[in-house]
Image (tube, grey):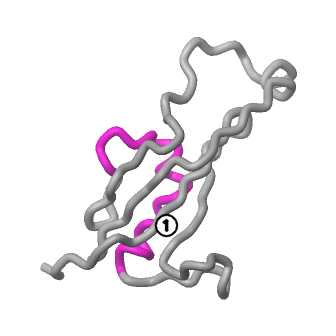
Amino acid sequence: MKKVLITAMAKARYDELSARYENPIEHTCDVAIGQQWVSVDGQRPEGMCESAWGSMEPFVAELARGGGNFFDGWMRNPNSAMISCNDGFRPVSFYIETIEDTPLA
């Protein structure tokens, strides 16, 4: 299987939507731009937000198995994807890409 590097690339914030629809919360996303994780064997890396992982897991799993080329040429690098977490108020975009082959067990 291949290891997959996950890099936080961008964060957005929609305060007008939060003010209109969200209940006040004290703690929001801790992800920093440039922060990285490595998925081994298609598993969620330690410290990776569970909600963000839910959005990217199918893509990471496919890349780990050697697949890619999502949506017939969507990405310049066919062994990658740009995936955003599912927080509609504070989405974070993650670039995921294979980084190496590991021996199959």
Q: Position of residue 17 (x, y in %)?
A: 84, 28
Q: Position of residue 3 (x, y in %)?
A: 30, 68
Displayed quadrant of residue 10? top right
Q: Main secondary structure of the magenta part?
A: helix
Residue at x 40%, y 43% (from the top left corner): 48
Quadrant of the rendering where the C terminus is positioned? bottom left
Question: Residue most toward the left?
Answer: 105
Quadrant of the rendering where the N terminus is positioned? bottom left
* Three-letter code, disc 1: Pro
Side of 54 where 103 appears, left or right = left
Question: Residue most toward the front?
Answer: 34
Q: Secondary structure at mark 1?
A: helix
**Nearer to the camera, 47 or 100:** 100
Residue at x 38%, y 83% (from the top left corner): 66
Q: Is 32 above or below relative to 3?
A: above
- Residue annotated with mark 1: 58
State which region is magenta.
45-65
Total numbered labels placed on residues in the image: 1
Side of 16 where 44 appears, left or right = left
| Magenta segment includes 105 | no
Q: Is 82 above or below relative to 93?
A: below
**Nearer to the camera, 72 or 53:** 72
| Magenta segment includes 51 | yes
Q: Position of residue 4 (x, y in %)?
A: 37, 65
Residue at x 32%, y 59% (from the top left corner): 39
Q: Position of residue 80 (x, y in %)?
A: 51, 72
